[in-house]
Image (cartoon, rainbow, N blue to C red):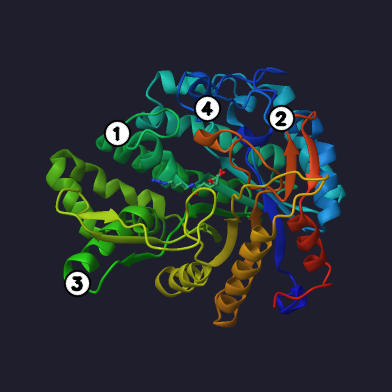
Amino acid sequence: MKREMFPGDFLWGVATASYQIEGAYNEDGKGESIWDRFAHAPGKIKDGTTGDVACDHYHRYREDIALLKELGVNAYRFSVSWPRIFPCGKGEVNQKGLDFYDALVDELLKQGIKPLLTLYHWDLPQPLQFHGGWTNTDTVQAFLEYAMLLFKKLGDRVELWATFNEPWCISFLAHELGEHAPGIKDLRTALQVAHNVLVAHGKAVKAFRSENPSGKTGIVLNLYPVHPSSESEQDKEAAILSDCYRNRWFLDPVFKGEYPQELLSVYQKLYGDFAKDYESIQVACEKIDFLGVNYYSREVVSHDPKSILKSKTVKVEAKRTDMGWEIYPQGIQEILVRINREYGPIDLYVTENGAAFKDELKDGEIRDYERIDFLKEHFKNTYYAIQQGVPVKGYFVWSLMDNFEWAHGYSKRFGLFYVDYNDNLKRIPKESARWFKKFLNNEISLE
Ligand SMILES: N=[N+]=NCCCCNC(=O)[C@@H]1[C@H]2[C@H](O)[C@@H](O)[C@H](O)[C@@H](CO)[C@@H]12
């Protein structure tokens, strides 16, 4: 199974995100983001690092685009740092911020690489957070102004636009579990955030359509197959509610304009006032051109009477990545086929898939054979979905290079290129980069 067996216009790319690679956290007029503040707070990041410098991509973007060229990809997914454009979140525009993304897009196009731009990959301008962040509908309005400015400035050259990266993380991971910025631990707040982000998504898609009819918009969701640990009714019930929490809480509003009833009724029992939001979620259901699917692993759950979802995650015996996530390649096929069956027809992009492993630099080499095997199996399972008629239009490996892995700092390496943090952030191709390049050049097959 070679690259040529995938559709001719299939996009093969890699993905990154602004806060994770850019650095220059306070340069050229950029404002503070919630991740700048969160990373600087003691104890939030496991290795005590920040994204202040990261991979210094802000200054090295030409070198990094040369790496894309070397790989042979035909697409690149990146995100724009909102506080680099609007240092205060709204109002005054930072021209140097716009100039950076203008130059980035021009260089990508010059190298024959198609950009997929993500408007929001978690780095909210801190001044907006002072006023409640995503719990405040003023932030929805500010997001629309930010999105409209970028549509105007880059819409002539960028065709693929994703509004949000992983609203599940923006809401639940960051506002219920507190593991990500702004580090709040309150379910009601998380639900309000999820709601406002979904509304912002729908409004931005509608505005985009009026401004740029030729472009294509979508949203990027992290999706997981959720399996019951046994065939018992209670475990199957646990899987249904966990699936609503992880997947359908965002899929259903975006494609059906409603929250999944099974879980909505649970939350309405907890928060009676939540009902009033239910009607306005129809705004989220603006027709989109594609869905970005971030796939990393599956979830296995069993009944847990103590939890709101009546479910708890079960750690099954399995091969795992350095993140502790089960390696489950058939899950990418399962999720792509399911989305097509239950929410299609809709063009799908695998906007992120990849793995962290304990990569070691030895004699100038990084022999990451586990990552090669991981990618090979996920490429094959993506192909099996295409063979079943699923309109998968592209695949982006997470990530181009090792970078700031959120609460894990630099301790987790997802890159095809190794970044030597002890040697001037030098980028060194891992074996997986060489393998990917050969695959893209039709030199090797996936068997
Ligand atoms: N409870 N709990 N769960 C944790 C679930 C977190 C899911 N994380 C992701 O999907 C993030 C996505 C992100 O876009 C990228 O910016 C990250 O670097 C990758 C790798 O981590 C993945």
The part of the image, by quadrant, that contains residue 255 is bottom left
The circle drawn on residue 189 is 1
Marked residue nearer the N-terminal end (2 or 1): 2
In this rendering, which labeled residue sits more in front, label 2 or label 3? 3
Whole-number angstrom distance, CA of label 4 to CA of label 2: 20 Å
Q: Amino acid at mark 2?
A: Leu
Which residue, given by chain and number where applicable, does mark 4 sit on? 35
Badge 3 element: loop
Whole-number angstrom distance, CA of label 1 to CA of label 3: 33 Å
Marks 4 and 3: CB-CB under 8 Å?
Answer: no
Marks 4 and 1: CB-CB under 8 Å?
Answer: no
In this rendering, which labeled residue sits more in front, label 1 or label 3? 3
Marked residue nearer the N-terminal end (4 or 3): 4
Classify 10 Å Cα crowding around label 1: few (below 14), some (14-19), many (20 and above).
Answer: some
The part of the image, by quadrant, that contains residue 385 is bottom right
Badge 2 element: helix
In this rendering, which labeled residue sits more in front, label 4 or label 1? 4
Marks 4 and 2: CB-CB under 8 Å?
Answer: no
Marked residue nearer the N-terminal end (1 or 3): 1
Which residue, given by chain and number where applicable, does mark 2 sit on? 98
Classify 10 Å Cα crowding around label 3: few (below 14), some (14-19), many (20 and above).
Answer: few
Which residue, given by chain and number where applicable, does mark 3 sit on? 232
Residue 3 image position (x, y, % from top left):
75, 73
Residue 154 image position (x, y, % from top left):
71, 41
Whole-number angstrom distance, CA of label 4 to CA of label 1: 18 Å
Whole-number angstrom distance, CA of label 2 to CA of label 3: 55 Å
Residue 305 image position (x, y, % from top left):
14, 53
Q: Does residue 77 appear left or right of residue 140 in this picture? A: right
In this rendering, which labeled residue sits more in front, label 4 or label 3? 3
